[in-house]
């Protein structure tokens, strides 16, 4: 037996899910959008009953009017493509918050196609293939079942066709069932083959008037190379990537706040348009390593921790860091790192080591896949005083000549060099020259923006300094580094994160992807590397959907951290592998299976790392079961006639009946469960009821409600004025 209505409902739901899954394959939206169709599917069942409520219909109409006003504003705020996608999502929400008719089913299928179309022009991830296959299959089944249903209901003219809750619309013949299933399966297979061939053979084109949403578009984040390109827009990705606690700082707040620079790695080599790493010889390492992290031959050992000697008169700051996915091969740690130790199970294959270049870079050795981990770190905070830096000479002799040559290389043109000479005129020391360049770049002559103007493939920094003067941190840092190199100051750029959002409830900092940053380190004779940052701070404040994504990513990061730390990342507490081992344990002298009791007690113990999991898990299960039971009872308890779509005349008849019920209730007459004849006999016994007025009204109600009669709104308005109580003056 096939219930056409339920089969169509499932096929249409799959189409909607496929459309939102296509959006989820685009980095801009993320996987969180797949919860939207799931929520709409749940609301659709309840909305079919809410549709009878006048207030609900008014609410839908009001929201539609407000969104119509918002449409031109959305184009200005989000751009044409995102505004169109938002409109499609709104239409889907509007249709799902109502009865699922044949007409609305076709409209939902069209909207699902528009979602997929909006996703394919935004360079989606491979997940789009699953969405395309799902949409293709669900569309075949939806159109076929809708056609069959329309044919089977074409002879019914007394009421509109309803997709759901018309249980008589079934196919009960076994041969027909298998015929329908076999036919649709064959058509689905053919559609998949043809769709795949069409996809492979169709030339790839742009998106017409919409354009590709990510054409020459980058996303904030870290890489192990920095290429100086222009002519693109950089998307502010506010996803939370790192959770940092300072356990020994008051209230978990690091002071000074401008020390929040999370170092990842240094880039010393510049080839004209790109920064990359340069590995120092072992004898020239900056990081003095101590045993046992270095072998007798000077080679770096690999393990769960690395450490170097501390330097005198430097403040040590401890950190507890959780990173959702290490963006490069190195760990982000507060500048300058002195000690790092991975936390978690010793069986975890991840290890750390100092980079062979010895530039405070901590390399993470991890298998392929997500590199989610928790680690402890200790850093030295050190910023030399201006007086100390002013005393540093121009000549640098404590760096090896080959490395010094790398650190002084630049390709600036003569005009740019003359401009730099003008800016640094009067600088009596390397520090004075660096400070003059920083003040110039961070002054009013330059503008910080993520909408980068086009830059030439050769000498891009010359164009930035002399022509465009607009850009982001990569251009500002590169300009400072190359200008300082021209003045004879060894420099390199450092990649990492700058800043963090302090969360008082967690006493921790949340570091986001859009906080990725590039700054400069300059070398001073007898002092070492000193940080300089010419880039203005971004004034970007997320609003609307961007703010929602930011808050969602923060909660998601906290959930991942809780799961990693308390469930799978440690040997203590509740872990599935430990639980299985204890269930099968026999070496404690107990009976087989007694390990299950110990595992449960450890799980529920107040001293267990996972002590909060058991009550939370049980309460969650109870709430889920209660919600499911309540929904099932409400659905089954609803009167069957409420699930049927009434005509306007039948709804007017219902309103008339409610008006009569209110009048009779005043006379003490209960109408519940009585037929019209029984009601007239019951009302005749009441001295307050005029049964001669009541009887024609009930007859009229039955003729309209069940006999196909008509009752206009004006008829209803007139009949409502008729009083069936003797204590009031009746009006015909």
Image: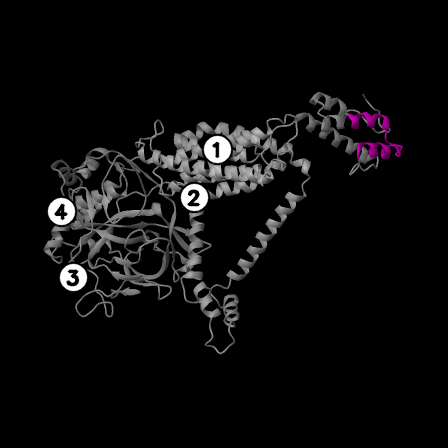
Instruction: Decide whether residue 547 is among the magenta residues.
Output: no
The quadrant the N terminus occupies is top right
Q: Secondary structure at mark 4?
A: loop
Q: Mark 4, residues whose alpha carbon is within 10 Å: few (<14), some, or many (≥20)?
A: many
Q: Is residue 165 shown above or below 358?
A: above
Is residue 463 toward the left or the right of residue 214 in the image?
Answer: left
For marks 4 and 3 on the same chain, the one whose residue lies earlier in the sequence: 3
Is residue 123 toward the left or the right of residue 389 in the image?
Answer: right
**Which callout, 4 or 2, points to the residue nearer the camera?**
2
Q: Which residue is mark 1?
A: 109
Label 1 near label 3: C-beta < 8 Å? no
What is the distance, in whole Å, between disc 2 and disc 1 at their CAs?
A: 27 Å
What is the distance, in whole Å, between disc 3 and disc 1 at their CAs?
A: 64 Å
Q: Which residue is mark 3?
A: 282
**Which callout, 3 or 1, points to the residue nearer the camera?**
1
Instruction: Decide whether residue 678 is among the magenta residues.
Output: yes
For marks 3 and 2 on the same chain, the one whose residue lies earlier in the sequence: 3
What is the distance, in whole Å, between disc 1 and disc 4 at their CAs?
A: 60 Å
Q: Mark 1, residues whose alpha carbon is within 10 Å: few (<14), some, or many (≥20)?
A: many
Q: Which residue is mark 2?
A: 549
Q: Is residue 388 shown above or below 605?
A: above
Q: Out of 353 and 622, give the one closest to the viewer.
A: 622
Does the image show residue 262?
A: yes
What is the distance, in whole Å, between disc 4 and disc 3 at their CAs?
A: 22 Å
Q: Which residue is mark 4?
A: 409
Q: Which residues are magenta?
A: 675-699
Label 1 near label 2: C-beta < 8 Å? no
Q: Residue at x 34, y 47 (%)?
A: 515
Q: Secondary structure at mark 3?
A: helix
Is residue 152 toward the left or the right of residue 657 in the image?
Answer: left
């Amino acid at each position: 037996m096939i219930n056409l209505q339920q089969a169509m409902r499932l096929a249409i739901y799959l189409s909607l899910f496929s459309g939102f899954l296509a959006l989820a394959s685009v980095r801009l939206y993320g996987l969180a959008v797949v919860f939207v169709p799931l929520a709409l599917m749940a609301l659709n069942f309840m909305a079919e009953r809410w549709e009878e409520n006048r207030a609900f219909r008014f609410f839908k109409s009001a929201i539609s009017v407000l969104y119509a006003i918002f449409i031109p504003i959305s184009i200005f705020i989000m751009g044409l493509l995102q505004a169109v996608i938002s409109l499609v999502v709104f239409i889907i929400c509007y249709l799902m918050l109502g009865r699922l008719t044949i007409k609305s089913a076709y409209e939902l299928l069209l909207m699902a196609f528009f979602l997929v179309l909006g996703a394919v022009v935004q360079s989606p991830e491979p997940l789009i293939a699953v969405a395309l296959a799902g949409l293709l299959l669900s569309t075949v089944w939806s159109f076929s079942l809708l056609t069959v249903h329309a044919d089977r209901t074409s002879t019914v003219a007394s009421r509109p066709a309803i997709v759901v809750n018309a249980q008589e619309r079934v196919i009960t013949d076994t041969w027909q069932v298998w015929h329908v299933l076999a036919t649709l399966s064959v058509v689905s297979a053919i559609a998949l083959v043809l769709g795949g061939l069409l996809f492979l053979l169709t030339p790839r084109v742009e998106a017409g008037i919409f354009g590709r949403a990510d054409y020459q578009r980058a996303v904030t984040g870290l890489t192990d190379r920095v290429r100086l390109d222009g002519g693109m827009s950089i998307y502010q990705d506010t996803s939370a990537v790192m959770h940092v606690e300072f356990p020994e700082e008051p209230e978990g707040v690091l002071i000074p706040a401008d020390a929040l620079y999370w170092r990842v790695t240094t880039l010393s080599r510049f080839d004209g348009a790109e920064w990359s790493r340069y590995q120092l010889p072992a004898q020239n390492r900056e990081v003095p390593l101590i045993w046992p992290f270095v072998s007798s031959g000077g080679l770096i050992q690999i393990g769960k921790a690395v450490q170097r000697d501390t330097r005198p008169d430097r403040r040590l700051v401890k950190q507890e860091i959780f990173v959702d996915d290490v963006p490069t091969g190195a760990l982000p740690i507060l500048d300058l790192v002195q000690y790092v130790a991975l936390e978690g199970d010793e069986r975890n294959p991840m290890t750390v080591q100092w980079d062979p270049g010895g530039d405070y870079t901590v390399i993470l050795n991890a298998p392929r896949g997500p590199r989610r981990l928790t680690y402890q770190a200790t850093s030295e905070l050190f910023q030399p005083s201006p007086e100390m830096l002013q005393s540093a000479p121009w000549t640098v002799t404590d760096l090896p000549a080959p490395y010094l040559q790398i650190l002084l290389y630049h390709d600036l043109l003569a005009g740019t060099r003359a401009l730099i000479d003008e800016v640094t005129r009067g600088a009596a020391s390397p520090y004075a020259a660096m400070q003059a360049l920083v003040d110039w770049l961070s002054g009013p002559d330059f503008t910080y923006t993520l909408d980068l103007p086009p830059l030439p493939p050769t000498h891009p920094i010359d164009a930035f300094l002399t022509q465009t003067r607009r850009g982001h941190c990569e251009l500002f840092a590169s300009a400072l580094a190359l200008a300082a190199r021209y003045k004879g100051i060894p420099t390199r750029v450092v990649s990492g994160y700058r800043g963090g959002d302090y969360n008082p409830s967690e006493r921790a900092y949340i570091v986001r992807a859009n906080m990725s940053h590039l700054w400069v380190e300059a070398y001073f004779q007898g002092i070492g590397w000193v940080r300089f940052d010419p880039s203005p701070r971004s004034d970007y404040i997320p609003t609307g959907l961007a703010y929602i994504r930011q808050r969602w990513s923060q909660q998601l990061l906290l959930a991942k951290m809780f799961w990693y730390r308390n469930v799978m990342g440690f040997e203590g507490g509740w872990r599935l592998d430990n639980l299985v081992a204890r269930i099968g344990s026999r070496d404690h002298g107990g009976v087989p299976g007694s390990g299950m009791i110990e595992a449960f007690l450890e799980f529920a113990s107040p001293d267990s790392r996972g002590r909060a999991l058991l009550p939370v898990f049980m309460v969650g299960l109870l709430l889920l079961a209660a919600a499911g039971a309540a929904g099932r009872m409400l659905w089954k308890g609803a009167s069957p006639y409420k699930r049927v779509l009434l005509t306007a005349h039948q709804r007017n008849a219902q309103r008339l009946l409610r008006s009569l019920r209110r009048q009779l209730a005043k006379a003490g007459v209960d109408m519940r469960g009585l037929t019209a004849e029984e009601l007239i006999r019951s009302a005749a016994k009441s001295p307050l009821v005029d049964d001669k007025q009541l009887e024609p009204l009930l007859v009229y109600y039955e003729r309209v409600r069940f006999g196909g009669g008509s009752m206009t709104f004006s008829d209803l308005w007139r009949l409502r004025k008729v009083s069936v109580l003797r204590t009031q003056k009746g009006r015909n």
